[in-house]
């Protein structure tokens, strides 16, 4: 009789078990803060974060973009030892996953997550899982000082600018931790969690109709050109279909901001902020060309460091002129700056980019999808160039599958 009851219970519970989805310990979540964080605020101040990239298992989406983590600040203060850095402690405890069913709002689950990093920021994560400010700089010269010494032999003014910029970034132990809404974090699940319903979320459907992703990819250049000398520049890995207003609105909703013009004033403001240890709302962007033209639009994601940022350039294609219709084609070259490097032949310095181009392409796609700005999308294969490609002045081979992401904007 007991076995019969157990069997009946198992049968009754089967639909619920089949309908459950689980977050596994160690799963990674990429989120964007919806609320600002300041180390001077009182503990238990509420904080929310928006999931901006899908979490999947075996092709099934477990946590879709648009889900919201809720938590609070557990405390803040200044270290008593080490670098006496400011710190903020966070605890996220609730995950709200939106459902496609209009009769239901969302499904919730208790979660425990651990911070891995504050993306593209001077702040770090200490062994206790707290967000901490940068450490006191070492008096021992490190590799990052070598470009300054080399540059100083050829360009004393440039060496002074670079040295002051990096010193301003390092001399930050006194600064309170202040992260604005829009700051992106990477987290990992500290333990498993189960949601009792599937979100039934799926990415935007493939492009159909008059727009042909294959023909778009076939006509698009593989790379932009560096303005000086026309050498190959950033890889063109995305295409957007929509009006200029739709492009601007999509990136604004996804947390991207327009870059400041590349001129003396923009360069000087960047230098002054870096040397003073201040954050950035925007940075100037060097000019690349496509079809002999500079970009029509430029966007970036900047936290509070000179050395790291996400940025992209957008060209109306095939011409910079014409009507601004919903069917306008735009080509995009996106890269992730991860440091600075010295260019000996130009006697100057520039940003060093991550050669894993596909990761930046997919980040842009995830950002726009999470912002509900995409109605359809397709990935299209393209032929790789003979001999491959490099970035960082020829020092780093590009890592890419050479596919282009084509997105139709809402």
Image (cartoon, rainbow, N blue to C red):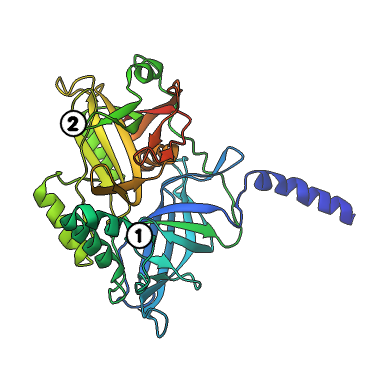
Seen from the viewer's position, the closer of residues 86 and 179 is 86
Tell me which corner region of the image, top left, top right, bottom left or bottom right, holds residue 176: bottom left
Mark 1 residue crowding within 10 angstroms, few (<14) / some (14–19) / many (20+)? few
Q: Is residue 384 above or below residue 227?
A: above
Residue 53 horizontal/vertical position (percent): 45, 45
- Give me the residue at 33% from left, 38% from top: 334
| Snapshot quadrant of residue 15 | top right
Of marks 1 and 2, the one in the foreground: 1
The quadrant of the picture occupied by the C terminus is: top left
Residue bearing mark 1: 144
- Whether residue 221 is visible: yes
Q: CA distance from mark 1 to mark 2?
A: 31 Å
Q: Circle 2 is placed at which residue position?
A: 294
Horizontal side of 330 relative to 20 (left or right) equals left
Q: Callout 2: few (<14), some (14-19), or many (20+) C-alpha neighbours within 10 Å?
A: some
Task: From the viewer's side, name the closer residue of 144 and 200.
Answer: 144
Residue 365: quarter of image: top left
């Amino acid at each position: 009789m007991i076995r019969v009851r157990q069997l009946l219970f198992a049968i009754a519970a089967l639909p619920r078990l089949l309908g459950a989805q689980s977050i596994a310990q160690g799963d990674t979540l990429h989120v964007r803060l919806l609320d600002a964080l300041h180390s001077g605020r009182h503990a238990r101040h509420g904080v929310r974060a928006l999931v901006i990239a899908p979490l999947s298992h075996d092709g099934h989406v477990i946590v879709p973009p648009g889900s919201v983590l809720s938590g609070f600040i557990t405390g803040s203060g200044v270290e008593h030892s080490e670098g006496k850095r400011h710190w903020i402690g966070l605890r996220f405890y609730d995950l709200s996953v939106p459902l496609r069913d209009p009769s239901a709002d969302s499904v919730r689950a208790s979660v425990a997550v651990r911070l891995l990093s504050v993306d593209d920021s001077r702040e770090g994560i200490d062994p206790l899982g707290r967000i901490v400010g940068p450490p006191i700089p070492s008096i021992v010269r490190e590799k990052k000082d070598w470009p300054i010494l080399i540059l100083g032999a050829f360009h004393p003014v440039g060496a002074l600018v670079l040295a002051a910029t990096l010193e301003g970034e390092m001399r930050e132990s006194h600064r309170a931790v202040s992260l604005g809404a829009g700051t992106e974090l990477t987290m990992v699940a500290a333990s498993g969690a189960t949601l009792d319903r599937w979100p039934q979320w799926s990415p935007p459907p493939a492009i159909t109709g008059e727009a042909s992703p294959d023909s778009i990819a076939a006509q698009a250049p593989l790379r932009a050109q560096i303005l000086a000398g026309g050498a190959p520049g950033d890889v063109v890995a995305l295409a957007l279909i929509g009006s200029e207003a739709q492009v601007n609105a999509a990136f604004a909703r996804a947390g991207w901001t327009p870059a400041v013009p590349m001129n003396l004033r923009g360069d000087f403001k960047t230098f002054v902020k870096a040397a003073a240890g201040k954050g950035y709302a925007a940075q100037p962007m060097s000019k690349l060309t496509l079809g002999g033209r500079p970009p029509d639009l430029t966007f970036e994601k900047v936290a509070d460091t000179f050395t790291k940022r996400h940025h992209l350039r957008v060209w109306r294609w095939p011409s910079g002129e014409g009507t601004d219709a919903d069917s306008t084609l735009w080509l995009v070259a996106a890269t992730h700056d991860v440091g600075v490097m010295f260019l000996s032949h130009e006697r100057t310095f520039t940003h060093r980019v991550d050669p894993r181009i596909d990761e930046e392409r997919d980040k842009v796609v995830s950002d726009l999808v999470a912002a509900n700005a995409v109605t359809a999308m397709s990935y299209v294969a393209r032929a790789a160039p003979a001999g491959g490609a490099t970035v960082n002045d020829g020092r780093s081979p590009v890592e890419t599958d050479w596919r282009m992401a084509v997105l139709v904007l809402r």
